Image (spheres, rainbow, N blue to C red):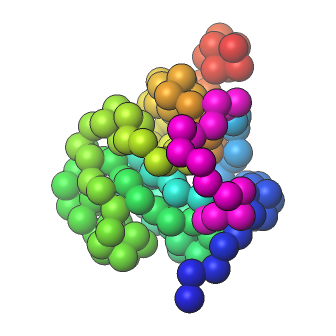
Amino acid sequence: MNKKLPRRKVLKACSGVATGGLVGCFTSTVQSEERRSPNDRPRVGVVGNGGIARSHGRGLKRLADIVAIADVDKQHLEQYNAEYAGGNATQYADYRDLIDERGIDAIFVCTPDHWHVKIAIDAMRAGKDVYCEKPATLTVDEGRTLGR
């Protein structure tokens, strides 16, 4: 049974996980080129498939379809895909290829801290919504850059 969840419910659930480490940082205003009902399950990509992504993956797979994943570690990719995406996610070694994929509504950034800003900016420029692991930035200047 493929239940359809409104995006607002997903956003609310994700923001409730903030105490566990997930922070809904910023969202882009550009929508996916494909016309879809707002009630469809969001299609997400997860960048960084280590421990933090796994802890979020348990809840995320109930709320959204994980359609793409990216990690530099092939073993992380294969394990995450099997456990949280049912083996159906497209796997990328380079997060930029994931961001370029059409049909992804949101990107979860679960990488080491120093990569958060770069990946979040690239994803927002590509018109994706972004959910970023904390800390979103390491400096005030990075925060200002991300907020532009």
38 to 146, vertically: above or below? below
On screen, residue 144 versus residue 68, left or right, reads right
Q: Dividing the image into 4 quarters, which one contains the C terminus?
A: top right
Hey, which quadrant is residue 2 in on the image? bottom right
Return the residue nearer the eye: 145 or 67.
Answer: 67
- Residue at image position (64%, 80%) is 3
Return the residue nearer the eye: 20 or 102.
Answer: 102
Q: Give the range drawn in magenta.
A: 28-41
Residue lying at the far left in this picture: please name it. Answer: 74
Residue 119 x %, y % = 47, 30
Q: Does the magenta stretch include residue 32?
A: yes
Q: Dividing the image into 4 quarters, which one contains the N terminus?
A: bottom right
- Residue at image position (70%, 45%) is 24
- Total numbered circles: 0
Residue 132 x %, y % = 60, 42
- Residue at image position (56%, 31%) is 127
Residue lying at the far bottom in this picture: please name it. Answer: 1
Do we see residue 117 in this rendering?
Answer: no
Hey, which quadrant is residue 129 in on the image? top right
Provide the major secondary structure of the magenta segment.
loop
9 to 125, vertically: above or below? below
Do we see residue 29 in this rendering?
Answer: yes
On screen, residue 69 versus residue 120, left or right, reads left
On screen, residue 31 versus residue 13, left or right, reads left
- Residue at image position (21%, 61%) is 75
Return the residue nearer the eye: 103 or 95.
Answer: 103
Residue 66 x %, y % = 46, 62
123 to 61, vertically: above or below? above
Q: Does the magenta stretch include residue 83?
A: no
